[in-house]
Image (cartoon, helix red, strand yellow):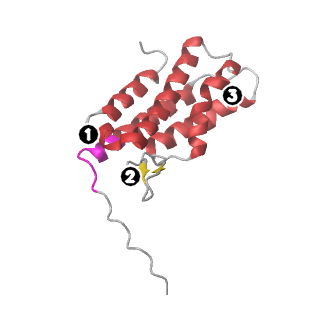
Amino acid sequence: MLNFPAPADAREPWEGEGEALAVAAEAGLRAAAWVRSLPGPAVACPIGSWLAWELPEAIETAMGSLDPSDEDAMGPDGVVVPGRGGVTEEVMETLMAVPCVLSEADWLSAEQQLRLVAVASVAAGCVRLVVTDAGTAILHGLLARMCASLTYASRPDAAG
C-alpha cells in the first residue's frame, strides 16, 4: 500500500474574489463579442477565420477561466513552480500572436487593429496578473481596472 501525503488544505478565497472573477468573465464575453462583430475580409483567408473564431474563443476562455489558486508558487526545493492562472498555454499563445498577425488583416482599420492588440494584450495581462500576484490583483482592484480597460478597448465601433 502506498502512503501518499494528505492533500494540502484548500485556500480560502480572498474577499471579493468571486465578484472579481465574474467581472473578468463578463469583460471577456463582451470583448469576444466585439471581435466577432468585426468585418471579415472580402476574400476568405486563414487570418480572417482565425480572427472570427480562434481569437474570440481564446479571449472568452482566458477571462472566464482565471484561477487565483493557479499562481506562481515556491516549491519545497526553493524553486519557483510556474502557475498558469487557470489558462492553457495554447490560449496564451493565441493571445500573444495578435500583434504578429494583424498586418495580414488589412481589411480592418488601423483603429480596429490597434484595439485588437489592446484587447489581446489586456486579456493576457489579466492572466499574468493572476499568476504573479492574485491576492493583490483582487484585493486592491487591479484586476477590476484591467477589466475596465478591456471593456473600453472592446467597446462597439460606433461608441466614442
Horizontal arrangement in the rendering, residue 104 relative to residue 70 (left or right) = right
Between the C-alphas of marks 2 and 3, the distance is 35 Å
What residue occupies the far front of the structure in this picture? 77
Q: Magenta segment: does it hold 83?
A: no
Residue 45, image x, y percentages: 75, 28
Q: Dot 3, crowdedness within 10 Å: few (<14), some or many (≥20)? A: some
Q: Dot 1, crowdedness within 10 Å: few (<14), some or many (≥20)? A: some
Q: Is mark 2 on a helix, strand or loop?
A: loop
Between the C-alphas of marks 1 and 3, the distance is 39 Å
Which segment did they paint magenta? Answer: 12-21
In-front residue for pair 62/34: 62
Q: Mark 2 points at which residue?
A: 69
Instruction: Give the image quarter of residue 112.
Output: top right
Q: Residue at x 46, y 32 (%)?
A: 125
Between the C-alphas of marks 2 and 1, the distance is 14 Å
Give, as a three-letter code, the residue at label 2.
Ser
* Image quadrant containing the C terminus: top left
Q: Residue at x 31, y 57 (%)?
A: 11
Horizontal arrangement in the rendering, residue 130 relative to residue 84 (left or right) = left
Image height of 98 relative to 88, above or below? above
Give, as a three-letter code, the residue at label 3.
Gly
Give, as a three-letter code, the residue at label 1.
Leu
Q: Name the residue under label 3.
A: 48
What residue occupies the far bottom of the structure in this picture? 1
